Image (cartoon, helix red, strand yellow):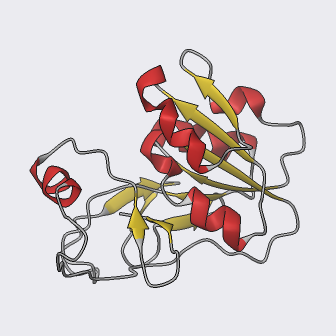
């Protein structure tokens, strides 16, 4: 889960209720208590000169908080269907595409400092197009401490535990 927004005294998350865990979280009401472990791993490096936020699907989740932290960085968002495009209102000035168009089609020739989150095929395409991009990889995190190797992803011929080294990794990783 990525932090989506952090108004004073609150934490907001964007959840797509697709399984029993996310459906249970979507049912939480104001005032309910939940236990949270985090933050885990490493986030985006905000010391960038020309940020460009790129997100696909539920990968939009960390972008509103990130955009606010970066002073309103421009964003490109991609969705598989019109059904999910409503999430784009979290970043009202973003450029939005819906499949079959891809977010990579809107990438400028010189994209600057790309900070991205989304599905693996999108991240792989960005790795090729933006060599210095910071990419937030997605994988289930079981223990959160690197012991179980449940969140391992293969990158550039080696394995990374996202709860320790990531979830945000440079394309150079």
Q: Please tell me whether residue 80 is drawn above or below residue 156 in the rendered image.
A: above
Q: Please tell me whether residue 124 is drawn above or below residue 79 in the rendered image.
A: below
Query: Quick check: can you spot residue 81?
Result: no
| Residue placed most toward the observer, 82 or 108 | 82
Query: Quick check: can you spot residue 23?
Result: yes
| Residue placed most toward the observer, 56 or 133 | 56
* Spot occupied by residue 8 in the image (x, y as percentages of width and height): 52, 82
Q: Please tell me whether residue 33 is drawn above or below residue 124 in the rendered image.
A: below
The residue at 17%/56% (across/down) is: 27
Q: Judge left or right: residue 154 versus residue 56.
A: left
Q: Quadrant of residue 16?
A: top left
| Residue placed most toward the observer, 106 or 67 | 67
Q: Quadrant of residue 13?
A: bottom left
* Spot occupied by residue 120 in the image (x, y as percentages of width and height): 46, 42
The residue at 42%/64% (across/down) is: 2
The residue at 59%/59% (across/down) is: 64
* Spot occupied by residue 169 in the image (x, y as percentages of width and height): 56, 65
The residue at 57%/40% (across/down) is: 88
Q: Judge left or right: residue 76 versus residue 137.
A: right
Q: Quadrant of residue 32?
A: bottom left
Q: How many marks?
A: 0
Quadrant showing the N terminus = bottom left
Q: Judge left or right: residue 109 versus residue 131.
A: right
């Amino acid at each position: 889960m990525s932090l989506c927004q952090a108004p004073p005294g609150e934490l907001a998350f964007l959840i797509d209720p697709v399984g029993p865990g996310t459906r249970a979280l979507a049912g939480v009401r104001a005032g309910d208590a939940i236990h949270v472990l985090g933050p885990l791993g490493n986030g985006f490096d905000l010391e960038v000169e020309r940020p460009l936020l790129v997100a696909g699907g539920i990968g939009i989740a960390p972008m509103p908080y990130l955009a606010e932290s970066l002073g309103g960085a421009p964003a490109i968002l991609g969705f598989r269907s019109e059904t999910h495009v409503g999430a784009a209102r979290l970043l009202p000035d973003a450029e939005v595409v819906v499949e079959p168009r891809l977010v990579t089609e809107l990438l400028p020739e010189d994209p600057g400092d790309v900070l991205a989150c989304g599905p693996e095929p999108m991240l792989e395409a960005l790795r090729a197009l933006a060599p210095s991009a910071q990419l937030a990889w997605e994988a289930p995190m079981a223990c959160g401490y690197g012991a179980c190797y449940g969140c391992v992803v293969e990158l550039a011929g080696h394995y990374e535990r996202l709860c320790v080294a990531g979830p945000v990794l440079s394309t150079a990783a």
